[in-house]
Image (cartoon, rainbow, N blue to C red):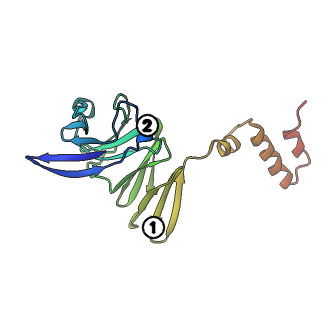
């Protein structure tokens, strides 16, 4: 998938993405072009008519690892997530910044990480977001299958969604069997004589 800005007859590539054939529905091709202000299917030259739904030109885009979603950063600072079939708009999130991010990658399959000089912004489902400050530290982000690696001159960090198994153990007031066993282990290590009460059932 390529993003172009047309000025008279010449085309300037602003952003480029590849959508693998295995992710595509049978009636879509693997080459799509965004030619401002139109989105074209490369083989059929079919206008997708997204001008009204997007509201501003696309300046950067990224395809989710599962190939089902596409994140678009618009010139007005809005992050839009839509299906790669262009049928559904999933999310509009106002970043309050009209500066183009240095990088925009997917963190797993349900969050988008945007990188600016000095901070990272992660936007998840339903518009929930987290900001990670990196003041005065240059960063480079690399997407992984289940998260994102953040490289700095001092080292490497990994950002990823908390796995469901870990969440079920550490969630507050969790009654999951693994959480009860973990609670009993903590009590046992603290020397509590009633540590087994947490796992014994009537």
Q: Residue at x 46, y 40 (%)?
A: 128
Relative to 121, does residue 151 appear above or below in the rendering? Answer: below
Horizontal side, residue 185 vs residue 90: left or right: right
Relative to 141, does residue 84 appear above or below in the rendering? Answer: above
Relative to 3, does residue 84 appear above or below in the rendering? Answer: above
Which of the two residues, 133 or 25, is positioned nearer the viewer here? Answer: 25
Q: Residue at x 38, y 44 (%)?
A: 19
Which of the two residues, 132 or 162, is positioned nearer the viewer here? Answer: 162
Q: Which residue of the protein is positioned furthest toward the left in this rendering?
A: 8
**Which residue is identified by label 1?**
152
**Which residue is identified by label 2?**
68
Q: Quadrant of the N terminus?
A: top left
Q: Residue at x 46, y 64 (%)?
A: 151
Horizontal side, residue 194 vs residue 1: left or right: right
The answer to whether any part of residue 149 appears in the image is yes
Horizontal side, residue 184 vs residue 77: left or right: right
Element carrying mark 1: strand
Relative to 12, does residue 165 appear above or below in the rendering? Answer: above
Q: Counting other residues with Cα less than 10 Å from the Cα at mark 1, is it few (<14), some (14-19), or many (20 or more)?
A: some
């Amino acid at each position: 998938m390529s993003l172009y800005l047309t000025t008279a007859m010449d085309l300037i590539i602003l952003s480029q993405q590849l959508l693998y054939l295995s992710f595509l529905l049978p009636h879509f091709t693997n080459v799509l072009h965004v030619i401002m202000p139109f989105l074209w299917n490369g083989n059929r030259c079919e206008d997708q008519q997204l001008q009204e739904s997007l509201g501003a030109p696309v300046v950067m885009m990224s395809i989710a690892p599962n190939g089902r979603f596409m994140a678009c950063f618009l010139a007005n600072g809005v992050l839009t997530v839509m299906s790669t079939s262009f049928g559904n708009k999933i999310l509009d999130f106002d970043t309050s910044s009209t500066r183009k991010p240095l990088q925009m990658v997917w963190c797993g399959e349900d969050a988008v990480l945007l990188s600016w000089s000095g901070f990272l912004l992660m936007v998840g489902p339903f518009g929930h977001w987290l900001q990670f400050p990196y003041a005065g530290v240059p960063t480079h982000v690399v997407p992984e299958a289940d998260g994102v690696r953040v490289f700095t001159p001092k080292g490497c960090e990994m950002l990823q969604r908390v796995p469901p198994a870990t969440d079920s153990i550490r969630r507050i007031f969790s009654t999951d069997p693994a959480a009860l066993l973990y609670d009993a282990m903590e009590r046992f290590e603290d020397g509590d004589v009633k540590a087994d009460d947490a796992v014994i059932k009537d």
